[in-house]
Image (cartoon, rainbow, N blue to C red):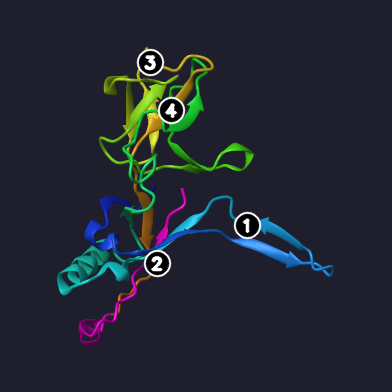
Amino acid sequence: MPDFHEVRFPLDVARGARGGPERQTQIVTLASGREVRNSRWAHSRRRYDAGLGIRNLDALAAVVSFFEERRGRLHGFRWRDQLDWKSCLPSQQPAATDQVIGVGDGVTAVFQLCKAYGAGASAYSREITKPCDGTVRVAIDGVELAASAFSCNLAIGQVAFAAGSIPPPAAVVTAGFAFDVPVRFDTDAIEVDLSAFAAGEIPRVPVIEIIP
């Protein structure tokens, strides 16, 4: 991913942010009153407002510094979504059997991390491109592998199996992990009125997901 900085937005500010997934659906109402609905995006896109997490001048200064270092909208960065940052439920710890990431054929050695939402034919599979260092666990047919049996590219979210550990035909490959969302600022200007900030006014700091 070009122009991306592998650094995470300040966690103490991100914890107070507001936002979540967004989709774009086109709806046409027919003369009969019935609707025809079409999804214009194959994948959801997450938006956040980091300004809601700024509680004091020190946090504001940290965000401004981070913004300047990223050159506004120019460079992407990592964002921790406090609701959705693990392969499992937020209250649980990632396990090697959390998510199915592929089925072996005896030849393929690289698998993309992903997370499923829902089950069955309507389930949505989200590609995970920014796993967190030291959190990725992998299993083949339910048996967890040693860390030496695979490696994970933290910049793109791909798991590569070492020679001798490539999944055999029909073997189910699963993984557990923590992850960040690749985002960028959605503005090139942060406007702050310090007198209004002292009176409780919150600056707006929009952040938007970068789709791979």
Residue that mark 2 sits on: 186
Residue 44 falls inside the magenta stretch: no
Q: Residue at x 40, y 34 (%)?
A: 158
Residue with the most extreme left position = 58
Q: Which residue is mark 3?
A: 165
Give the number of the disc on residue 40.
Answer: 1
- Dot placed on the residue nearer the N-terminal end, 1 or 4: 1
**Most foreground residue, 184 or 59:** 59
Q: What residue span does the magenta drawing correspond to?
A: 192-212
- Label 1 to label 4: alpha-carbon separation: 30 Å
Using a 10 Å C-alpha cutoff, classify the residue at mark 4 as few (fewer than 14 neighbours), some (14 to 19) or many (20 or more). many
Sort mark 3 into few (<14), some (14-19) or many (20+) by Cα contacts within 10 Å: some
Q: CA distance from mark 3 to mark 2?
A: 42 Å
Label 1 crowd bin: few (<14), some (14–19), many (20+), radius 10 Å: few
Instruction: Tell me the quarter of the picture where residue 71 sits.
Output: bottom left
Which amino acid is tagged 3? Ser
User: Could you tell me which residue is drawn at 39 percent across and 40 percent down?
Assistant: 88
Between marks 1 and 3, how big is the CA–CA gap? 40 Å
- Up-down relation of residue 61 to residue 15 (above or below): below
- Secondary element under disc 3, as helix, strand or loop, is loop
**Is residue 201 a member of the stretch shown in magenta?**
yes
Q: Are marks 3 and 2 in contact (CB under 8 Å)?
A: no
- What residue sits right under mark 4 in the picture? 174
Residue 137, given in percent of the width and then of the height, sits at 33, 29
Residue in the image at 57% along x and 42% along y: 123
Query: Alpha-carbon distance for marks 4 and 3?
Result: 14 Å
